[in-house]
Image (spheres, rainbow, N blue to C red):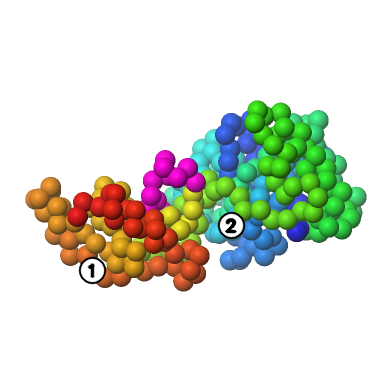
């Protein structure tokens, strides 16, 4: 397993370090990386290294996904987990980093490195930068955690995670990310914002029913409510146009386990209309190309039997 030590903006870190309940963050880049972020695998750690004069590692998180989004959507998905108090403050910071004076309506496309289970250390836990770190590094550097100096670095990180986690009631040392011997990637718990973006990208940013591509109109729907499962999974998601999402949640639409759309005729009775939606019934919806991203038939069956107003 590798870790990526990323040069981190102090303002971004300081803001997030004082927030409560941060389960995910968007480690955004003012300019996109060009469609992919190939330096990390899913579940590998990214460590936050402050710029000079601090030159210390101050926290980190676990890589889940890279994507490129309009700032407006990144803010809708992550809010203050973008590391700023408002969308306007984020917009101004991006403009400053890009050295431009944009029109007020410009919606920047930014690179979004989505991290889950982030951690932010108090100053007494900060780690000096690795001995081979060069001041010429602009973005970051990859370290193999099985070899030096990566191995020592990871031991320092896990020592701190252990110290913090074992202060919490009911926490076992075995729950610490990556364990305490050989570092291995571990599947992480997703936050709501990460779920939304993973579903959006899995469906190639188009509605599963209409193939609509206008991003502001698309929403990630849970098939079985999050309140019942208490976990986010792409296989429990559908990307739907916002009106279809509401009808799906209300039980007027469902998707069968073989991915066919069904519309309830009760829309005619309840709304004295609904014909436009009833006519959508029948065809197979569009599903992601990767099988591991497709809706789980068991979740769809649950929705058919427990939510659909057939």
N-terminal of the pair, mark 1 or mark 2, is 2
How many neighbours does mark 1 have within 10 angstroms: few (below 14), some (14-19), or many (20 or more)? Answer: some
For the point 58% across and 31% down, the residue is 20
User: Does residue 222 show up magenta in the picture?
Assistant: yes
Q: Where does label 2 land, which residue?
A: 65
Residue 181 shows up from this direction: yes
Query: Can you say which quadrant of the picture contains the N terminus?
Result: bottom right
Residue 130 shows up from this direction: no
Q: Measured from the top left, where is residue 47 in percent x and y?
A: 73, 48
Q: Measured from the top left, where is residue 146 in percent x and y?
A: 83, 58
Query: Marks 1 and 2, how far apart in space?
Result: 34 Å
Q: Is residue 237 above or below residue 38?
A: above
Q: Where does label 1 land, which residue?
A: 282
Q: Nearer the viewer, residue 68 or 148?
A: 148
Left or right: where 103 falls relative to 52: left
Dots 1 and 2: beta carbons under 8 Å? no
Q: Secondary structure at mark 1?
A: loop
Q: Nearer the viewer, residue 47 or 306?
A: 306
Q: Nearer the viewer, residue 243 or 172?
A: 172
User: Does residue 202 show up magenta in the picture?
Assistant: no
For the point 51% across and 38% down, the residue is 86
Q: Secondary structure at mark 2?
A: strand
Residue stretch rendered in magenta on the structure: 220-231
Q: Is residue 250 above or below residue 160?
A: below
């Amino acid at each position: 397993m590798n870790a990526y030590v990323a040069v981190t903006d102090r303002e971004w870190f300081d803001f997030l370090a004082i927030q409560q309940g941060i389960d995910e963050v968007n480690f955004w880049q003012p300019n996109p990386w060009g469609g992919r972020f190939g330096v990390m695998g899913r579940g590998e750690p990214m460590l936050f290294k402050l710029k000079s004069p601090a030159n210390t590692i101050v926290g980190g998180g676990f890589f889940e996904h890279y994507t490129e989004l309009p700032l407006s959507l990144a803010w809708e998905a992550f809010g203050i987990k973008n590391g700023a108090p408002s969308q306007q403050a984020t917009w101004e910071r991006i403009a400053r980093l890009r050295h431009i004076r944009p029109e007020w309506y410009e919606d920047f496309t930014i690179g979004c490195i989505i991290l889950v289970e982030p951690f932010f250390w108090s100053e007494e836990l900060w780690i000096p930068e690795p001995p081979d770190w060069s001041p010429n590094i602009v973005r970051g550097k990859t370290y193999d955690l099985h070899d030096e100096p990566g191995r020592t670095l990871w031991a320092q990180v896990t020592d701190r995670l252990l110290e913090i986690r074992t202060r919490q009631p009911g926490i076992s040392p075995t729950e610490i990310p990556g364990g305490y011997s050989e570092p291995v990637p571990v599947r992480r718990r997703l936050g709501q914002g990460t779920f939304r973006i993973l579903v959006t990208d899995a469906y190639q940013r188009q509605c599963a029913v209409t193939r609509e591509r206008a991003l502001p109109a698309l929403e990630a729907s849970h098939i079985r409510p999050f309140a019942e499962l208490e976990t986010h999974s792409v296989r429990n998601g559908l990307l739907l146009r916002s009106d279809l999402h509401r009808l799906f949640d209300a039980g007027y639409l469902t998707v069968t386990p073989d991915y066919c759309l069904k519309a309830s005729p009760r829309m005619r009775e309840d709304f004295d209309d609904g014909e436009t939606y009833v006519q959508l019934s029948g065809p197979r919806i569009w599903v992601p190309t990767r099988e591991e991203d497709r809706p789980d038939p068991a979740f769809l069956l649950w929705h058919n039997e427990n939510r659909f107003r057939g």
